[in-house]
Image (cartoon, rainbow, N blue to C red):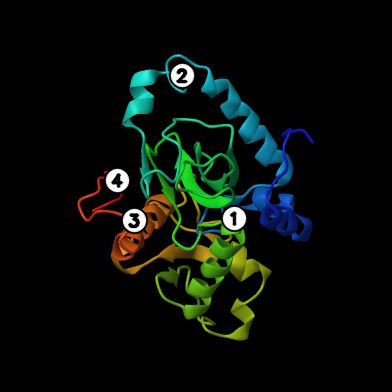
Amino acid sequence: MQFGFALPQAVRESYLVVDGQEPESSAGCADGLFFGLHLLPLEEVYDEWRFWREVDSDPSSGAHQGLREVMQSIPAGWIRREYSQRGWIPLISDKTGNYVGVDLNPGEGGSVGQAIIFGRDFDTKVVLWRGDGPAGWARWLASFVEDLEGGEGFELGGATESEGSEDDVGYESYFFDGTGRGSGDGAGGSGAGGMRLSGEYRGWNVLEAWADKSVRKWQEAGLVPEDAVTQDKGKV
């Protein structure tokens, strides 16, 4: 009711199951559930969204025509070329102004409800791989779980002598890194229980890694040219 429009069914069902991260876990450590990124409670979703509505009309940012012209969309035409947009609903945050969210006002080639990466550091907005379509949020969450269950692309830090035992699969091992504190940071470098990206994305900011991976997948699908320019970000 406060947004003034309906949220996608997938988002409604998701938040009826769990309203973001538990406040005690968010206050007790620096970790977010998604490799350090935080699943926002609905109240914070609205607060973040409302803050960005001030940016929409700011002549130095959201309303700056020159800035809007350099914005890009991957795949092209799926996301509106804007710096900020009232149709972008933030759901996962790095706590520094960048998000995974759903797009309720897409470009001509996109779909209402597609899951996207956007925010202050992303001139190129990216539709997440397997996050397209009206149920994009649900499809992307399912793909995230599948990746975790596959055990590839990430590793666990804070190893102890009992590593690999059933004792590790508990509340403390999930939220802490083995030293009594959370191991995540504002940029989403590593997450719950010291979970961090590995392989070719080792050391990358999580959002940048997800964006890069999605761009590659869209290229493989033939929807993005091989020479498409996205973010010049990530760690070497």
Q: Earlier in the sequence, mark 1 or mark 2?
A: 2
Spatial distance from mark 2 to mark 3, Cα to Cα? 27 Å
Is 128 rendered above or below residue 67? below
Residue 211 appears in the rendering: yes
Secondary structure at numbered mark 1: loop
Residue at x-position 47% and y-position 41%: 107
Q: Amino acid at mark 1?
A: Pro
Which disc is residue 134 wearing? 1
Residue 203 appears in the rendering: no
Q: Nearer the viewer, mark 1 or mark 4?
A: 1
Q: Circle 4 is placed at which residue position?
A: 230
Residue at x-position 58% and y-position 68%: 142
Residue at x-position 66% and y-position 74%: 170
Q: Circle 2 is placed at which residue position?
A: 63
Q: Earlier in the sequence, mark 3 or mark 1?
A: 1
Q: Circle 3 is placed at which residue position?
A: 215
Q: Earlier in the sequence, mark 1 or mark 4?
A: 1
Is 118 rendered above or below residue 36? above
Q: Residue furthest bottom?
A: 165
Q: Earlier in the sequence, mark 3 or mark 4?
A: 3
